[in-house]
């Protein structure tokens, strides 16, 4: 009987696989947090003049409450 050799790819060790899994999970979580971050919106509103904020019905102290209104005041 002829013996054939198959091209096999060695499987990574369990430790390497687990490390890779959690590294990917951490990267996904970081991406999620960055998307949820509202720093850009806060900075944009903070850059406006008091008059521009008043036209939006806001005062400078109200910016965080306004930006996070869907999370904090539901």
Image (tube, rainbow, N blue to C red):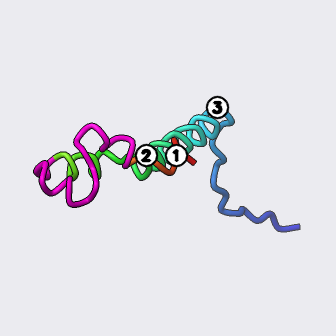
Question: Which residue is more in the foreground, 49 or 29?
Answer: 49
Q: Residues within 10 Å of mark 2 (few under 14, many from 20)?
A: some
Instruction: Give the extent of the magenta segment.
Output: 47-66
Residues at circles 1 and 2 in contact by the CB criterion of under 8 Å: yes
x 59%, y 36%: residue: 16
Q: Which mark is residue 63?
A: none
Percent from the top left, x then y, of residue 10?
Answer: 64, 49
x 58%, y 38%: residue: 22
Reading the image, the residue beneath label 3 is: 15
Percent from the top left, x then y, of residue 55?
Answer: 20, 60
Q: CA distance from mark 1 to mark 2?
A: 5 Å
Reading the image, the residue beneath label 1 is: 71
Q: Earlier in the sequence, mark 2 or mark 3?
A: 3
Q: Is residue 13 above or below residue 24?
A: above
Q: CA distance from mark 3 to mark 1?
A: 38 Å
Q: Is residue 57 above or below residue 62?
A: below
Q: Which mark is residue 68?
A: 2
| Residue 37 is covered by the magenta coloring | no
Tell me: 16 left or right of 44. Answer: right
Q: CA distance from mark 2 to mark 3?
A: 40 Å
Tell me: 5 left or right of 73. Answer: right
Q: Residues within 10 Å of mark 3 (few under 14, many from 20)?
A: few
The N terminus is located in which quarter? Answer: bottom right
- Residue at disc 3, secondary structure: helix
Question: Which residue is more in the foreground, 13 or 45?
Answer: 45
Percent from the top left, x then y, of residue 50?
Answer: 13, 48
């Amino acid at each position: 009987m002829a013996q054939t050799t198959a091209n096999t790819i060695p499987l990574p060790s369990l430790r390497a696989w687990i490390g890779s899994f959690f590294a990917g999970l951490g990267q996904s979580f970081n991406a999620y947090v960055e998307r949820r971050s509202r720093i850009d919106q806060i900075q944009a509103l903070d850059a406006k003049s008091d008059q521009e904020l008043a036209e939006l019905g806001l005062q400078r102290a109200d910016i965080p409450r306004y930006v996070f209104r869907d999370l904090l005041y539901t």
